[in-house]
């Protein structure tokens, strides 16, 4: 088990969506993005048109139009229809994302504290804590499984954001929170995809973690090999990420 | 001083276009206080308006310097320029200064200077209360900046101060207490100003100035003031509870002792989202004043615009929890729907502005340039706002640089472009001088390029996963590239202020020679000298529409202005005092004829006979 070279772990860009929920977020994002481009283009074209077409050519007073009710109703009604459409897209996606599964394949308890993370697999009695040598802790997850995260904060508000999941949830001290994801079949090593998104004090910027997704059988083997009763530290304990 | 109207027709049968300068005596310009004691004791709404605007621009400069520290630190990965603790204080105070000490007070500055002028009033309803509000604001601002000098530095919990981080154990220093006290002081100042504005608009409109003849800016300041009354006291209450938690061992927000951190978020955002519109509505008003003037057309859909503002005001009180989608503690679908709906009246405004320009005769002096810059950046920010109003998308982008980019487009773009549009537009009214158009062009294009270079690519950073409020970031290619671009953009943005400052200095060194109405504008502030005299007016045109000065200019031409102005004009020949109730407030009460000595005249509108 070699020490990982930090340089080789950098993610070049945003990781691909790893969960079914992330896929549906991406679909909604694309809908919003293209409608947004459309509206922006419309307004920019209208502004450029009036600027060019109606620039002052002589000193005559233009026709003094005060209002035009049909046009005003049109440009109120069309945006209203668009936002109702966007709401429908949102409503359906949110329902799918917020659904909590009673029987997840794996439960992970996450505790956020100033300024790192602790991941516990309660069924196996395994706990992963901040690793040494200034490396980020690693969250190991099984591919093709349903995972529920139970979130808690030990001190101030943190926010558990896995960019590859396109999802975050605040960790508010005093109130536990849960969400579920259906992880797809992509496996691999996703460094720095875990971020604390809520400002939490001095070292907020360093409060990150990496995600590693193993095939289900390898995940089971890895979990069984971990010592119970003491926190697991160090990348060596977690295994070769390659 | 001229207080009578010249005859409507000059004798030869050619109709002519009147100019306001024919009615007001530009030798009788008003002045600002000339001594320190004068500034300290003034209750004149114009002097206080100037004081508000200058002070808020000083805070803009301070907030800008803090932004410079942020961009310098983020230009490269690693921690080079300031320590973590200092950085956290810097972005906290940057946000707080820009929101509480620049954007909101600038709007109050506009309300101070322009609102009485626009409704034909001699001052705000409560001038001493107004002076008190201003000084409360100055003291509040000073208290916030004092945080940097305190042990442990300034408050370092972000401008929305989430407990428990903002609590006693999370932020033990004095800086946090100073921040809380400062925001309570400025909030109280704002509340008092709102009371003043509401009383003034309700009670002190000049005869003829009905609600639906008020300039849109006045309407927006009026509606803004109701939002202030609704929300600022909530913030002050929430802050007092936070301070009590810190100093008197109460436990409103402390989860360890049974308090609720989420309660703070509800209270803060119940203030915080209407706050966005408290900032923006006055600037929507500025744009609605400028577009018609430089298009030579009336505002398109006046009533629709007022209704849209009312709808925004009403809806803004029901959208706050979209700031809390990722807490998992709110009904996201409800707040998504209300947040989407608020896009509709906002879009209506944009179309009204475009409709005003449509078919017009557009000229592009400095105010109009900045208004067009405003339109484009504002629509950009509005679109990302609709995206973030969808919880689905917000789950990924909340608290990322995407949000930073979004609110800099809506708050930064809206505010900064509209602030400069307002400064260029009303500068001749306030100073009696013009600003250089050539320097204004430099200013505008540098600002446009600088602003978009700084903030456009922050959308990419957020989408890629960079959280906000970080002193450092991973040395990933795209993070390094776009952060550097953003920092370079900030340099251009900062450089754009140089031509503006040069223009200001040059202008102030020249003599005040501008007439009452250099832009051929519409509303009543242009019907008096530049700068206006003490108590504002010695003469008022008949007010029969939202464009009394336009109607006056075209009064010789049947069918151009609104009907009824000509009759009103004829009726007041020789009976000026009847049309000048403002003599009640003027310094020269001997100008007012006794009621019984006034002639009985027939009112051309309702046919009643009165004195």
Image: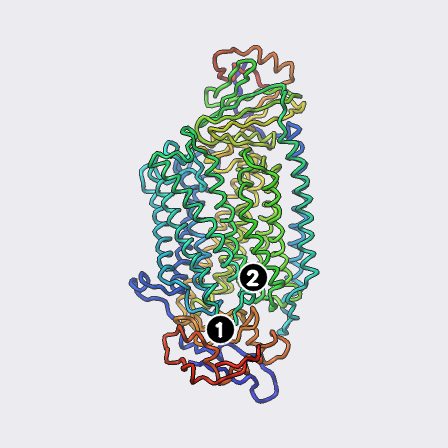
Look at the numbered disc 2 and give the secondary structure of its residue.
helix
Residue B598 position by quadrant:
bottom left
State which quarter of the image contains the N terminus of chain A: top right
**Residue drawn at 40 percent across, 74 percent down:** B584
Decide: few, some or many residues near mark 2? Use Cα within 10 Å; few <14, some 14-19, many ≥20: many
**Residue drawn at 56 percent across, 73 percent down:** B544
Residue B429 percent across, percent down from the top left: 46, 68
Residue B505 percent across, percent down from the top left: 41, 63
Spot the residue most to the bottom: B11
Tag shown at residue B288 = 2
Say whether residue B459 is visible: yes
Residue sitting nearer the eye, B263 or A85: B263
Q: Is residue B317 above or below residue B303?
A: above
Residue sitting nearer the eye, B360 or B157: B157
Residue B234 percent across, percent down from the top left: 44, 46
Residue B353 percent across, percent down from the top left: 61, 60
* Disc 1: host chain: B
Say whether residue B81 is visible: no
Residue B403 position by quadrant:
top right
Residue sitting nearer the eye, B47 or B122: B122
Q: Specify which label sits upstream in the sequence, 2 or 1.
A: 2
* Disc 2: host chain: B
Look at the numbered disc 1 and give the secondary structure of its residue.
helix
Tag shown at residue B527 = 1
State which quarter of the image contains the C terminus of chain A: top right
Instruction: Give a yes or no on whether discs 2 and 1 share a subunit.
Output: yes
């Amino acid at each position: 088990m070699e020490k990982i070279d930090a340089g080789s772990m950098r993610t070049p860009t945003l990781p691909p969506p790893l969960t079914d929920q992330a896929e549906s977020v991406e679909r909604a994002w694309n809908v919003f993005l293209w409608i947004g481009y459309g509206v922006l283009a419309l307004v920019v074209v209208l502004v450029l048109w009036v600027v060019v077409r109606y620039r002052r050519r002589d000193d005559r007073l233009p026709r003094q139009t005060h209002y035009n009710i049909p046009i005003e109703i049109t440009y109120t009604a069309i945006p209203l229809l668009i936002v109702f459409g966007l709401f429908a897209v949102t409503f359906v996606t949110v329902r799918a994302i917020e659904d909590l599964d009673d029987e997840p394949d794996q439960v992970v308890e996450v505790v956020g504290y100033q300024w790192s993370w602790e991941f516990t697999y309660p069924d196996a009695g395994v706990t992963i804590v901040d690793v040494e040598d200034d490396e980020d802790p690693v969250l190991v997850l099984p591919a093709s499984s349903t995972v529920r995260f139970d979130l808690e904060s030990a001190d101030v508000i943190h926010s558990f954001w896995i960019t590859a999941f396109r999802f975050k949830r605040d960790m508010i001290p005093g109130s536990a929170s849960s969400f579920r994801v259906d992880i797809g079949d992509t496996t691999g090593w996703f460094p720095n995809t875990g971020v604390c998104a809520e400002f939490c004090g001095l070292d907020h910027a360093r409060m990150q973690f990496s995600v590693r997704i193993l095939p289900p059988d390898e995940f089971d083997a890895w979990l069984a090999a971990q010592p119970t009763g003491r926190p697991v530290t160090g990348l060596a304990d977690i295994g070769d990420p390659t | 001083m001229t207080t009578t109207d010249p005859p409507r027709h000059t004798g030869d049968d050619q109709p002519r276009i009147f100019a306001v300068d024919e009615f007001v005596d530009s030798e009788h310009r008003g002045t600002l206080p000339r001594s320190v004691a004068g500034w300290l004791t003034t209750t004149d709404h114009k002097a206080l308006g100037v004081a508000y605007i200058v002070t808020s621009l000083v805070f803009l400069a301070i907030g800008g310097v803090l932004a410079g520290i942020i961009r310098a630190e983020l230009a490269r990965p690693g921690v080079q320029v300031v320590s973590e603790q200092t950085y956290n204080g810097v972005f906290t105070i940057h946000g707080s200064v820009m929101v509480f000490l620049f954007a909101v007070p600038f709007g109050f500055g506009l309300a101070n200077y322009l609102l009485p002028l626009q409704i034909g009033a001699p001052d705000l309803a409560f001038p001493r209360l107004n002076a008190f509000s201003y000084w409360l604001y100055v003291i509040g601002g000073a208290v916030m900046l004092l945080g940097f000098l305190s042990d442990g530095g300034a408050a370092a919990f972000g401008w929305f101060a989430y407990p428990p981080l903002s609590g006693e154990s999370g932020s033990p220093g004095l800086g946090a207490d100073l921040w809380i006290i400062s925001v309570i002081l400025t909030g109280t100042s704002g509340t008092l100003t709102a009371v003043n504005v509401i009383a003034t608009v309700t009670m002190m409109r000049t005869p003829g100035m009905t609600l639906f003849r008020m300039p849109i800016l006045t309407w927006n300041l009026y509606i803004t003031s109701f939002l202030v009354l609704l929300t600022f006291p909530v913030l002050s209450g929430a802050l007092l509870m936070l301070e009590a938690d810190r100093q008197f061992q109460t436990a409103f927000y402390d989860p360890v002792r049974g308090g609720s951190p989420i309660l703070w978020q509800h209270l803060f955002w119940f203030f915080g989202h209407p706050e966005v519109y408290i900032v923006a509505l006055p600037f929507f008003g500025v744009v609605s004043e400028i577009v018609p003037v430089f298009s030579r057309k009336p505002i398109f859909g006046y009533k629709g615009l007022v209704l849209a503002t009312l709808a925004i005001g009403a809806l803004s009180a029901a959208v706050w929890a979209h700031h809390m989608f990722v807490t998992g503690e709110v009904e996201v679908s409800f707040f998504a729907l209300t947040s989407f709906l608020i896009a509709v009246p906002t879009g209506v405004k944009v179309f009204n502005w475009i409709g005003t320009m449509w078919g017009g005769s557009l000229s592009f002096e400095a105010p109009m340039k900045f208004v067009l810059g405003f339109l484009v950046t504002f629509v950009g920010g509005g679109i990302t706002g609709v995206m973030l109003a969808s919880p689905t998308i917000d789950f990924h982008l909340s608290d990322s640089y995407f949000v930073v980019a979004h609110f800099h487009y809506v708050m930064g773009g809206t505010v900064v472009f509209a602030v400069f549009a307002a400064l260029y537009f009303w500068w001749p009214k306030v100073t009696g001088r013009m600003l250089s158009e050539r320097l204004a062009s430099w200013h505008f294009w540098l600002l446009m390029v600088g602003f978009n270079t700084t903030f456009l690519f922050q959308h990419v950073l957020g989408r890629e996963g960079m959280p906000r409020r970080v002193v450092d970031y991973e040395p990933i290619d795209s993070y390094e590239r776009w952060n550097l671009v953003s920092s370079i953009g900030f340099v251009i943005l900062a450089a754009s202020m140089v031509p503006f400052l040069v223009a200001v200095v040059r202008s102030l060194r020249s003599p005040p020679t501008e007439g009452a109405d250099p832009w051929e504008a519409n509303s009543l502030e242009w019907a008096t000298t530049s700068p206006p005299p003490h108590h504002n007016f010695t003469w008022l045109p008949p007010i029969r529409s939202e464009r009394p000065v336009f109607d006056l200019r075209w009064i010789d031409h049947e069918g151009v202005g609104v009907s009824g102005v000509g009759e009103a004009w004829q009726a007041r020949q020789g009976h000026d005092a009847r049309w000048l109730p403002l003599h009640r407030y003027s310094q020269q009460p001997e100008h007012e004829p006794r009621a019984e000595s006034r002639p009985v005249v027939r009112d051309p509108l309702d046919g009643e006979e009165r004195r």
